[in-house]
């Protein structure tokens, strides 16, 4: 996928990293093994993603989409963020335990399913919409805001 | 709508059924699919005209569910159909007519909506499902199910990418008029409502829709739409289904279709979707040739149809 705007490209790279990490988590869970280090890595990455990536989208991008008449997708993605946050809170609490509690496995599966689907949705709907919506000036503004 | 068969009650699925649906499905699918069912139930609430979903309840327990989606213009269709995507019965309630009752509820509702047929697909090795579909009166459909593995596909290995022949981008709402115009040239029909729904779905629906437009010197030359959702037809691995493909007659045989397909495979690879599938009518020889030439092969799945008597 190719995107014209720098902010779209940056978010795309982060999405790719999320897909790769949670693909590994899914494979590990499907194999029946318990990789405590991988679960802690996933929990740490998730905390960062929620704090930075989600927050940026909700405060900077979704309001712009809504103002441009794309409020439906902003609303849908916000709902998905809320569901991911709820599952993430459960996962992060459980990922600390070693040996793991049995509840970790279904929560990790749920989170992998939610995150992968959410990223796919953003790649196919949010980022192309941003490419259409933003001009070069707005793109630079958003890059600065994301970097700060 | 309510039906009663001894202690069995049928009613539309409701958001409050989610936990029970997920619990019933998990042992059958081998994993929990909460997000999938949550999306499907949410989509039915937002677009009830496109979704039929029933629960079978015995006493306080949900013992089965069925999910189906209305087909509009997918796969070149000319009349509405209903695609059965999920039908599950709890192990303890199987062989007691629950699946049959759920399917009958779908049929009744389809007739009320003037839908003329039900369609579905199943793996040819899924003997229990094949027996069940036979029992329900399904017959083999005329279409061929074709598939292609995304990673390592022949098309992506081509040293001279076809996508260099056209500028392929994500389809957006502003492309609607061009898509409707090309589709009208190809099919001779006005399918604005279907195309509008398909475009809206990319932005607002639950599953992932990958829709692409190919432009040559700034002019729309073709489009492709595919939909991916983990869970339909008992699948537990991600598969994208191409349901709409059109190339303007004046750009036929100029590599536009291959350019669209290549870009789709690249996008799916980035999204970690491993296979792509489509259904082609048996008599659409040119389209069959196109997909076979692009590296598609017969899928290990069969397409079924059940006409509904008025």
Image (cartoon, rainbow, N blue to C red):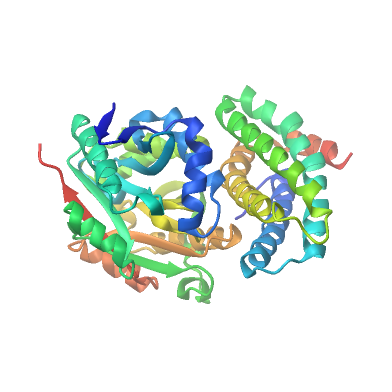
Kindly give the residue lying farthest to the right in the view shown.
Answer: A148
State which quarter of the image contains the C terminus of chain B.
top left
User: Between residues B164 and B245, which one lies in front from this camera angle?
Assistant: B245
Q: Residue at x 20, y 41 (%)?
A: B79
Residue A142 shows up from this direction: yes
Q: Position of residue B24 (x, y in %)?
A: 47, 48
Kindly give the residue lying farthest to the left in the view shown.
Answer: B310
In the image, B310: left or right of B260? left
Q: Position of residue A130 (x, y in %)?
A: 64, 38
In the image, B147: left or right of B267? left
Q: Residue at x 50, y 61 (%)?
A: B237
State which quarter of the image contains the N terminus of chain B.
top left
User: Between residues B255 and A145, which one lies in front from this camera angle?
Assistant: A145
Q: Residue at x 74, y 52 (%)?
A: A14
In the image, B211: left or right of B126? right
User: Between residues B199 and B32, which one lies in front from this camera angle?
Assistant: B32
Q: Position of residue A65 (x, y in %)?
A: 63, 29
Residue B300 placement: quadrant: bottom left
In the image, A76: left or right of B189? right
Q: Is residue B7 above or below residue B76?
A: above
Q: Position of residue B150 (x, y in %)?
A: 50, 67
Residue B138 shows up from this direction: no
């Amino acid at each position: 996928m190719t995107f014209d705007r720098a902010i779209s490209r940056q978010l795309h790279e982060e999405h790719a990293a999320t897909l790769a990490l949670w693909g590994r988590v899914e494979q590990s869970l499907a194999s029946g093994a318990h990789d405590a280090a991988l679960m802690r890595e996933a929990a740490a990455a998730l905390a960062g993603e929620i704090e930075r990536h989600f927050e940026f989208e909700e405060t900077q991008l979704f309001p712009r989409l809504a103002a441009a008449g794309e409020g439906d997708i902003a609303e849908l993605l916000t709902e998905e963020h809320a569901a991911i946050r709820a599952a993430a809170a459960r996962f992060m609490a459980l990922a600390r335990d070693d040996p793991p509690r049995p509840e970790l496995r279904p929560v990790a599966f749920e989170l992998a399913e939610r995150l992968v689907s959410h990223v796919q949705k953003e790649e196919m709907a949010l980022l192309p919409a941003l490419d259409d919506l933003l001009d070069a000036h707005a793109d630079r503004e958003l890059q600065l805001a994301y970097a700060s | 709508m309510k039906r009663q068969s001894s202690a069995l009650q049928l009613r539309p699925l409701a958001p409050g059924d989610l936990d029970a649906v997920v619990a019933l499905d998990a042992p059958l699918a081998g994993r929990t699919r909460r997000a999938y069912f949550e999306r499907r139930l949410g989509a039915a609430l937002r677009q009830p005209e496109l979704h039929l979903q029933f629960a079978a309840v015995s006493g306080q327990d949900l013992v089965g569910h069925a999910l189906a989606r209305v087909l509009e213009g997918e796969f070149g269709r000319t009349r509405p159909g209903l695609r059965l995507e999920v039908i599950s019965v709890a192990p303890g309630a199987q062989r007691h007519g629950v699946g049959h009752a759920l399917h009958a509820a779908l049929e009744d509702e389809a007739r009320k909506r003037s839908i003329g047929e039900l369609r579905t697909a199943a793996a040819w090795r899924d003997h229990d499902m094949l027996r069940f579909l036979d029992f329900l009166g399904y017959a083999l459909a005329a279409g061929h199910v074709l598939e292609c593995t995304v990673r390592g596909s022949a098309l992506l290995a081509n040293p001279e990418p076809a996508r260099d022949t056209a500028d392929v981008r994500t389809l957006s709402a502003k492309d609607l008029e061009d898509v409707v115009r090309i589709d009208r040239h190809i099919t001779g029909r006005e399918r604005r409502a279907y195309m509008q729904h398909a475009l809206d779905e990319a932005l607002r629906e639950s599953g992932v829709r990958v829709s692409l437009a190919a432009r040559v010197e700034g002019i729309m030359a073709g489009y492709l739409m595919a939909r991916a959702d983990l869970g339909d037809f008992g699948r537990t691995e991600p598969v994208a289904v191409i349901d709409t493909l059109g190339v303007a007659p004046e750009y036929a045989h100029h590599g536009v279709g291959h350019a669209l397909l290549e870009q789709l495979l690249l996008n799916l690879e980035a999204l970690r979707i491993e296979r792509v599938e489509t259904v082609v009518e048996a008599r659409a020889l040119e389209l069959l040739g196109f997909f076979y030439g692009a590296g598609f092969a017969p899928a290990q799945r069969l397409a079924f149809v059940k006409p509904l008597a008025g």
